[in-house]
Image: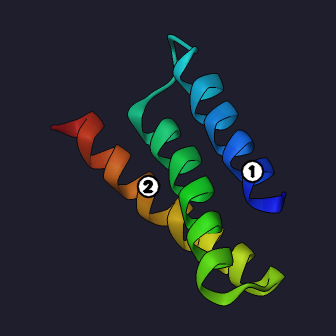
Amino acid sequence: MKLINLKIICIASVLSLSGCSSITKQDVGTGVGAVAGGVAGHALFGSTLGTVGGAAAGAIAGNQIGKYMDNH
């Protein structure tokens, strides 16, 4: 049940971010990275700390990738 809810949240997050016309790739990268990192952290560690840590790491990575894509 938790996995289904998590998938729904991920899909909703991506769809809501992609609907904005003024949003940058850096913004989208941050959001998508945070969601993907949170999912990965939860899957790997199965704890709240793993989920939060994964979300933070994913947000940072997604932010930098999006920033690079905006500039090139």
Vertical order, 41 against 30 (above or below): below
Query: Measured from the top left, where is residue 67 in percent x and y?
Result: 34, 46
Quadrant in the picture for the C terminus: top left
In this image, 25 relative to 8: left or right?
A: left
Residue at 62% in and 36% down: 11
Question: Which residue reaches farthest left?
Answer: 72
Query: Measured from the top left, where is residue 57 in percent x and y?
Result: 54, 73
Residue at 66% in and 36% down: 13
Question: Which residue reaches farthest front?
Answer: 1
Quadrant in the picture for the N terminus: bottom right
Residue carrying label 2: 62
Q: Quadrant of residue 26?
A: top left
Residue at 59% in and 25% down: 15
Q: Quadrant of residue 3?
A: bottom right
Residue toward you, 54 or 46:
46
Colour style of the rendered protein structure: rainbow
Say what amino acid the circle numbered 2 marks. Gly
Disc 1 on helix, strand or loop? helix
Calculate the distance from the C-alpha at mark 2 to the C-alpha at mark 1.
23 Å
Residue at 29% in and 35% down: 70
In primary-sequence order, the first of circles 2 and 1 is 1
Residue carrying label 1: 4
Say what amino acid the circle numbered 1 marks. Ile
Query: Measured from the top left, where is residue 10 in percent x and y?
Result: 65, 44
Question: Is disc 1 surrounded by few (<14), some (14 to 19) or many (20+) residues within 10 Å?
Answer: few
In this image, 34 relative to 60: left or right?
A: right
| Mark in front: 2 vs 1 | 1
Question: Is disc 2 surrounded by few (<14), some (14 to 19) or many (20+) residues within 10 Å?
Answer: many
Residue toward you, 3 or 44:
3
